[in-house]
Amino acid sequence: MKIEPTALPDVLLIRPQVFGDERGFFMETFHEAKMAAQGLRERFVQDNLSRSVKGALRGLHFQNPRGQGKLVRVVAGAVFDVAVDVRRGSPTFGRWVAQELSAENKLALYVPPGFAHGFCVLSESADFFYKCTDFYAPEHEHGILWNDPDIGIAWPVRDPILSAKDSRYPRLASLGDELPCYLPGA
């Protein structure tokens, strides 16, 4: 497995080693020691799986306090996955990075605490699996409007299927204490 930085250095792309033959394939999706040797030393405490239909957009979500890092991958279908730096004072505040994740490309993305996360489904449906570094805490859940023009995410959908909650989130510029603080070197 190989871990690479993205355009936002704290967001990491994980390329697994895949062993295939006429029977199918095998790959490690998580190996604590191998990831730690490459700098990803997070402790994961909760696993989640969601299924969404084509055109569904989930996000942009974050928790503060009790931020959640997420190790995300797609086990069926394909998604356009996005991370946005929402840490006040960060040199990359408000910048975003995206990666197509699919069952075919087998890539994973690590989205650290302090980043909003979201995805939209590109295939007929997608099964989205993710590990979290802290437990879900609804009282600390926040979000940003998926199409905030100040962020300018180039989503591959024009009229996504949204939850009522996701459609009502505020723009990033209107948030204050809800946002986590950037801690250099943390």
Image (cartoon, rainbow, N blue to C red):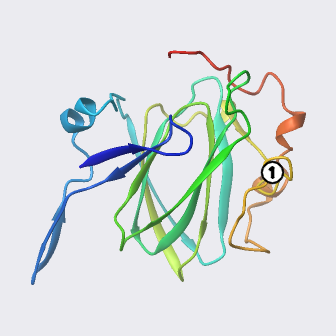
Q: Which residue is mark 1?
A: 145
Q: Residue at x 57, y 29 (%)?
A: 67
Q: Residue 122, how many percent across, how many down?
A: 57, 76
Q: Is residue 57 above or below residue 140?
A: below
> Observer-nearest residue: 116 or 65?
116
Q: Residue furthest right?
A: 174
- Name the residue type under label 1: Leu
Q: Residue at x 68, y 24 (%)?
A: 180
Q: Residues within 10 Å of mark 1 (few under 14, many from 20)?
A: some
Q: Does 31 sit left or right of 131 as displayed?
A: left
Write down the quadrant of residue 23 in the picture: bottom left
Q: Secondary structure at mark 1?
A: loop
Q: Residue at x 73, y 27 (%)?
A: 179
Q: Residue 136, how many percent across, how many down?
A: 54, 37
Q: Is residue 111 above or below residue 81?
A: above
> Observer-nearest residue: 104 or 137?
104
> Observer-nearest residue: 92 or 51?
92
Q: Residue 152, how many percent across, how many down?
A: 79, 54
Q: Does 28 sit left or right of 94 as displayed?
A: left
Q: Is residue 113 above or below residue 158?
A: above
Q: Does 170 sit left or right of 137 as displayed?
A: right
Write down the quadrant of residue 181 in the picture: top right
Q: Residue at x 72, y 63 (%)?
A: 154
Tell me how many marks there are: 1
Q: Does 173 sit left or right of 82 as displayed?
A: right
